[in-house]
Amino acid sequence: MKLLNQYLREQFGCKVYKIAINGGFTCPNRDGTIDTRGCIFCSGYGSGDFAEDASKSVFEQIEDGKKRVEAKMPSKGKNGKENGKYIAYFQAFTNTYGPVERLRTLYMDAVSHPDVVCISIATRPDCLGKGVLSLLSEINKIKPVWVELGLQTIHEKSAEYIRRGYDLSVYDKAVKDLNNIGIETITHVILGLPGERREDMLETVRYVAESGSKGIKLQLLHVIEGTDLAKDFRAGNFKCMSMDEYVDLIYECVKILPDDMVIHRMTGDGARKTLIAPLWSLDKKRVLNAINHRISVLNNPKLVSDNGKE
C-alpha cells in the first residue's frame, strides 16, 4: 500500500493540501428519490461538516480554504517559492447529483484555479450516469479527477440498516465505468457499523482491495448528534469500538491491502460540538500515533495518511 502524502508528492512534486468544497448539492437519499432521511450516520451537513461556505463560488471557497491552510502551514518558503498546492474536494452530500451543465460550471471553477492540481468528488455509485461520466472524462483531460465512492460495507444487512439505497453490483459497475475512462477511484469504508464482526469488516476491505479501486478511506464510525444512529446508540443497541480495538483492526486492514493501493484515511474527523461517540477519536494526534506504533512492524514507521481536515 501507499500513503496519501507520499503518493501526492510522487504525483505533483510538492506538498498538497485538501480544501473541502460545498457545492450546494443534495442527495437522492434526502430529496425523496430513494428516501428523505439520509443514511443513518450522515450529519445534517451531508458529511461536509468542515466544508467551506456554500453561498460563495467554488473559486472563492478555494481562496478561503487556502487562507486557513496557510495560517497553520505557510505554503511559501523563506525564498517566496510555493511549497504546496491544493486539491479541491467536493465533499458535502452527493457531488455528481445534478444537471450536467451545473456540474460543469462547478468543476471548471475548481480546475481553473491556478493552485488546484486535482479535484476530488465525493458521490454515490448510483449517481454516475452517462452524461456525468462524459463530463468527468472531459475534466480529467484538463486536470486529474478523483471520484470518491461511499460504499461503507459489502454486507447486505448492514447496507439496509444504514439506508444506503443501492446494491453492491451498482458499486462494481461504477468502479468499472470510472476505470474505463481513466478516473481514479477512492472507496469509503466505515469500520464499526452496528452488528458487524471484525471479520465482516475485513471482508469489506478485502473486497475493495480487489475491486479495481485505486484508493481507500478507512473511516471510524462516528455517532453524530441529530442522526438516527444516535438514537440507536442512546437506546443501547450497539457500542462503539475502543481505541485499542480500532488500532488493531487498522493493522489487520493494512496487511490486506495491495502494494499499489493508496490509503487516503485511517481514522476520521468528528465535529467536537456534535460528536457523541467515540470521544477518544477527538484526540486525532494520539490515535494516529497509536496506529503508527502498532503497524511499525510492517516497516512503515510513518504510516500517517490523513492529509488535513476533510
Image: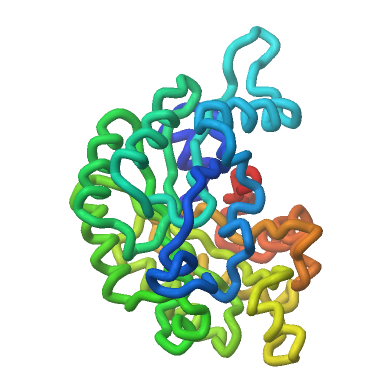
**Residue drawn at (65%, 48%), measured in percent from left and top?**
50
Is 244 positioned to the left or the right of 135 in the image?
right
Q: Position of residue 270 (x, y in %)?
A: 70, 59
**Residue drawn at (37%, 33%), measured in percent from left and top?**
105
Whether 272 is drawn above or below 211: the answer is: above
Residue 156 appears in the picture as rendered? yes
Q: How is the image coloured?
A: rainbow
Whether 90 is drawn above or below 292: the answer is: above
Q: Classify residue 256 by image quadrant.
A: bottom left
Q: Classify residue 151 by image quadrant.
A: bottom left
Is 254 positioned to the left or the right of 168 in the image?
right
The extreme top residue here reads 79
Q: Nearer the viewer, residue 119 or 85?
A: 119
Q: Nearer the viewer, residue 22 or 7?
A: 22
Residue 296 appears in the picture as rendered? no
Q: Position of residue 174 (x, y in %)?
A: 28, 62
Q: Nearer the viewer, residue 103 or 148?
A: 103
Q: Position of residue 98 (x, y in %)?
A: 36, 50
**Residue drawn at (42%, 84%), measured in percent from left and top?**
155
Q: Position of residue 144 (x, y in %)?
A: 35, 36
